[in-house]
Amino acid sequence: MRVSKERLEEILLYYLLHSKEDTLITFNITEETLSRYIREARKKLKLADANKLEILTKISEQYDDSELRIISKGKRTLPSQKDAPRINFSGEHIRFGALGDTHIGSIYTDDSWLLKAFKEFKKEGVDFICHVGDVTEGMSNRAGHIYELTHLGYDQQKRHAIDLLSEAPAPLYIIDGNHDRWYIKSNGAIVVKDICEALPDATFLGHDEGDIELKNNAVLKMWHGLDGNSYATSYRLQKIAEAFTGGEKPNIMICGHTHKTIWLPNERNIEMFSCGSIQKQSKWMRGKRISAHTGFWIIDVWVNNLGISGCQGKWYPLYS
């Protein structure tokens, strides 16, 4: 029985986006018939289409259905995050703002500093903004912590964070940190995800880390971490870079958690930034003799067909 070109395309498209088993069941055909349709497609379709079909067939064999749907939307799959958003931009240059550890709801956080960062981001025309976790202060069981809060509990901190982050002048990409995840431990709430869903242009990338794809497969990784400060500020970033296997290394990495700032250029071919904090030094930090580098970054990146061809960061310190 002969089959039309349109029918061939319908069956083969379904096959490429689903499994072989699903295709056989959906179209009530045998495996032998499907193989025959593939052979006929190579004859009936133009040579370019036939070659494309062969490539797509090989791709479909390497990914599951959910991954194929991600790829079909122009996104990519990464080891740490299946659905990595892609930033589309013309030319080779892109500029973004980077900050973290805002600890919204803490008495040590000056809300005006966050708004100042947004004002500078707008002035300098950033294309997007990365927040590397500890969006909220959270609520721990540490004795006396409740007296260090301006906003108590999940609902108040979430609402205040939404109010502040709604002032962002560009799309936000956000991961959560250990302070945010205190709400998961206490009541199962994913506060940063809920904040992002309430904002018009914010994307929650995941717990503790998340990836963004720039053009030509360049990857920007956001990282919070659960480790502590190191004696030398650069040592932490060096050890993080060292921990990546070759195939999983990002091109750019921006890190939070330690409230320290440093730019480590080209560490294992990774441009590494530690983002400092918007929160001032707390009494807990002072007791541990840990300083806070308060401020934010504006980072320029140039991407060509070989990958990252240039990177430049400007640190904006914040002082009391």
Image (tube, helix red, strand yellow):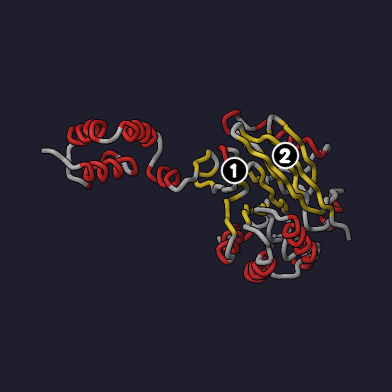
Residue furthest right as drawn: 320
Marks 1 & 2, CB-CB < 8 Å contact = no
Q: How many residues crowd mark 1 within 10 Å: few (<14), some (14–19), many (20+)?
A: many
Residue 149 or residue 18, whichever sits in front:
18
Q: Residue 253: percent from the left, percent from the top? A: 67, 41
Q: Secondary structure at mark 1?
A: loop
- Which corner quadrant of the image does residue 268 belong to? top right
- Which corner quadrant of the image does residue 134 belong to? bottom right
Q: Which mark is residue 311?
A: 2
Residue 320 or residue 137, whichever sits in front:
320
Residue position marked by numbered label 1 in the rendering: 214
Kindly identify the amino acid type of the residue bearing the numbered disc 2.
Answer: Cys
Kindly identify the amino acid type of the residue bearing the numbered disc 1.
Answer: Leu
Q: How many marks?
A: 2
Is residue 27 at least partly visible in the picture? yes
Q: Residue 201: percent from the left, percent from the top? A: 58, 61
Looking at the rendered image, the quarter that the C terminus falls into is bottom right
The residue at 69%/60% (across/down) is: 140
**Residue 289 falls left or right of residue 242:** right
Q: Residue 25: percent from the left, percent from the top? A: 21, 45
Looking at the rendered image, the quarter that the N terminus falls into is top left
Q: CA distance from mark 1 to mark 2?
A: 13 Å
Residue 35 or residue 8, whichever sits in front:
8
Q: How many residues crowd mark 2 within 10 Å: few (<14), some (14–19), many (20+)?
A: some
Q: Residue 129: percent from the left, percent from the top? A: 67, 54
Q: Is residue 160 above or below residue 271?
A: below
The residue at 66%/71% (across/down) is: 156
**Residue 58 falls left or right of residue 145:** left
- Which corner quadrant of the image does residue 9 belong to? top left
Q: Secondary structure at mark 2?
A: strand
Is residue 186 at least partly visible in the picture? no
Please tell me which of labels 1 and 2 falls first in the chain: 1
